[in-house]
Amino acid sequence: CEMEVGGTCECSDFLKCIYFSGIDFATRKIAKLLKPQKVIEQNGDSFAIHTYSSLRNYLVKFKVGEEFDEDNKGLDNRKCKSLVTWDHDRLTCVQNGEKKNRGWTHWIEGDKLHLEMFCEGQVCKQTFQRA
């Protein structure tokens, strides 16, 4: 099963959230201009989430319910222990590392993919339209 989303990406509080994530000033300024695309591949409980942009690409692979080492190279360059679980119809990731209360939640409503990223009490919401 694969879902590709892109085109329209609506963001709220994006700069505030990535500031608290520790991303440097220059990267934050560029990031606010990006229109990322996502491809999500699912095989049972295993997922691969690809994020593509003109600045950089990122891939995270995981199996729901199994903790894994995540290297955020190219994002904020931090390493953390991540655990993704189902919360009803939402995939929620908790990332344990240098930053507190950090992670994300993905869910689908119709043709839209919703993403909430959270870090140290800040929340960034993005909505992607199916391509």
Image (cartoon, rainbow, N blue to C red):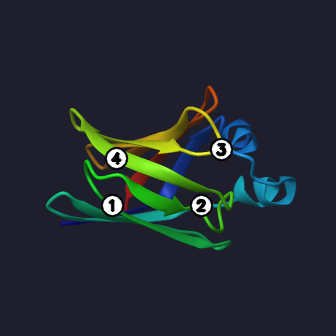
Identify which amino acid the numbered label 3 is placed on. Answer: Glu
Looking at the picture, tell me which residue is in the foreground, 73 or 8.
73
Answer with mark 1 or mark 4, whichever residue precedes in sequence.
1
Q: Are marks 1 and 2 in contact (CB under 8 Å)?
A: no
The secondary element bearing badge 4 is classed as strand
Looking at the picture, how far across and down is residue 1, in whole percent? 18, 66
Query: Which residue is denoted by mark 4 in the rendering?
Result: 84
Q: Residues within 10 Å of mark 2 (few under 14, many from 20)?
A: some
Up the image or down, 4 lies above or below 111; here it is: below
Looking at the picture, how far across and down is residue 18, in whole percent? 69, 45
Query: Which residue is denoted by mark 2 in the rendering?
Result: 35
Q: Are marks 3 and 4 in contact (CB under 8 Å)?
A: no
Looking at the picture, how far across and down is residue 91, in whole percent? 31, 43
Q: Are marks 1 and 4 in contact (CB under 8 Å)?
A: yes
Q: Rounded to the nearest whole Å, what is the CA distance between mark 3 and mark 1?
A: 21 Å
Identify which amino acid the numbered label 2 is placed on. Answer: Lys
Quadrant of the image occupied by residue 101: top right
Q: Rounded to the nearest whole Å, what is the CA distance between mark 1 and mark 2?
A: 24 Å
Answer with mark 4 or mark 2, whichever residue precedes in sequence.
2
Answer with mark 3 or mark 4, whichever residue precedes in sequence.
4
Q: Residue at x 66, y 35 (%)?
A: 13
